[in-house]
Amino acid sequence: MSKVLLIGAGGVGRVVAYKCAQNPGVFSEILLASRTKSKCDAIAADVKRDTGYQALHTAAVDAEKVPELAALIRDFQPAIVIHVALPYQDLTIMDACLEAGVHYLDTANYEPRDVAKFEYSWQWAYHDRFREAGLLAVLGCGFDPGVTGVFTAYAAKHHFDEIHYLDIVDANAGDHGKAFATNFNPEINIREITQKGRYWEHGQWVETEPHEIHRPITYPHIGPKESYLIYHEELESLVKNFPTIKRARFWMTFGEEYLTHLRVIQNIGMAGIEPVNYKGMDIVPLEFLKAVLPDPGELGEGYTGQTSIGCRIKGVKDGKDKTYYIWNNCSHESAFRETGAQGVSYTTGVPAMLGAKMVLEGKWSGKGVFNVEQFDPDPFLNELGEQGLPWHEEVNADLEFEYD
Ligand code: NDP
């Protein structure tokens, strides 16, 4: 039985709070802390009403202020911090965990506010400090990154001697009824999908123009959807941890309407991250855009359809070629019924809770900074379905892709 500090009261924080409360045998007490305390209070009231779990407290914290956060951690004494605020806070929260001596887990890699660039180097650089402190930092434990890494580790452990080709396929076939909205923090989301595409091939990164490469991919219970090759952070750790991979790519579906809005937003400069002086005030266009777009945490009501995310893998087993597909489909409506959040928050929050549970139960252990694929995938996948994200697999499936 352990205490947990949960940072971030957005859509994902809401789901993690529900899921920890549903596992009271592991999470004996929860402190939900975020920049705006009223958002934590609203989530706490819903969780208490719907689950009956009462040991949920709230606090205001600025997670970019290390002394303030370290003091909160020392005062509450959690066994682990689950960070589901924004990627800008990864390093300050890791610093505070080191200072206060607790384990750390997040769902998105560090991104500096003033450069639209994300990579693991900044967080991997903490490895020695976590190791020397005898602490564990688990990086990228949402769905993608997160479950996609665990799926790949599971395929490597049970289905392949060598993985050669990895295609991560991510469809959101949901309809939230809005002309334009993002499914998680708009600022982070737009920074991610407007950058150049990138994939791994024959030992190097190949760069593409944004959304240059696309093709239809058929998703289970959804059908064919136009899918775009984008860069996604788990590619960086997966090609490092599975060096037999010859090609690794990430595909995501976008609708025509969504891409048109995105193009306009970019063309008129609203995706900019450089401050613009307006009436004597410095305003970052993308931050202002976030303020006028729908709050992703509020999209759940009336959101229909489902997401489908999985890994399509080709490699060799016992000297023979083999293909394998492993995936999860998640319904926006059932996610909303259970937690008041839509499917993208749900598919991120469930693995974040489960990763923390694995650490607290000693099923995932180590000293230092690790990506999820470095742990044993079995205990995690044994439980993922019962925690709300059932997964499926198909051996020797038609993966729809071309291979060398
Ligand atoms: P939201 O924007 O809805 O929520 C973010 C929360 O963090 C808000 O409550 C916000 O507070 C809080 N916050 C921001 N800055 C600070 C700060 N300095 N100190 C304390 N709290 C702060 O985002 P989501 O819930 O949609 O996403 C949360 C995280 O999950 C993001 O990092 C996102 O990248 C990641 N994610 C990962 C996915 C995966 O599969 N791996 C998929 C989707 C998301 P306030 O309300 O005051 O602004």
Image (cartoon, rainbow, N blue to C red):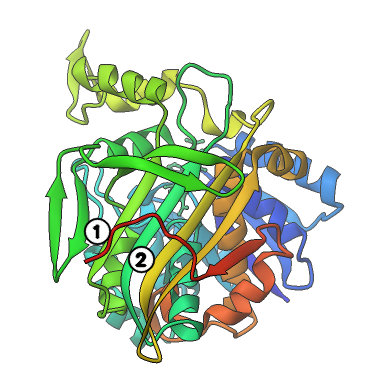
Under mark 1, the amino acid is: Glu
Residue occupying the point 37% across, 50% down: 87
Under mark 2, the amino acid is: Asp
Q: Residues within 10 Å of mark 1 (few under 14, many from 20)?
A: some
Q: Vertically, is 294 above or below 38?
A: above
| Quadrant holding the N terminus | bottom right
Residue receiving disc 1: 119
Please state which of the two labelled residues, at mark 2 or mark 1, is closer to the viewer.
1
Residue occupying the point 17% across, 64% down: 201
Mark 1, secondary structure of its residue: loop
Q: Position of residue 161 (x, y in %)?
A: 38, 87
Residue occupying the point 48% across, 82% down: 159
Asked whether residue 329 is in view, the answer is: yes
| Side (left or right) of 220 relative to 370 | right
Q: Position of residue 337 (x, y in %)?
A: 77, 39
Q: Could you tell me how far apart the alpha carbons at marks 2 and 1 are, in whole angstroms?
A: 18 Å
Residue receiving disc 2: 95
Question: Considering depth in this image, is 181 or 114 the residue closer to the camera?
Answer: 181
Dot 2 or dot 1, earlier in sequence: 2
Asked whether residue 78 is in view, the answer is: no
| Quadrant holding the C terminus | bottom left
* Residue 344 placement: quadrant: top right
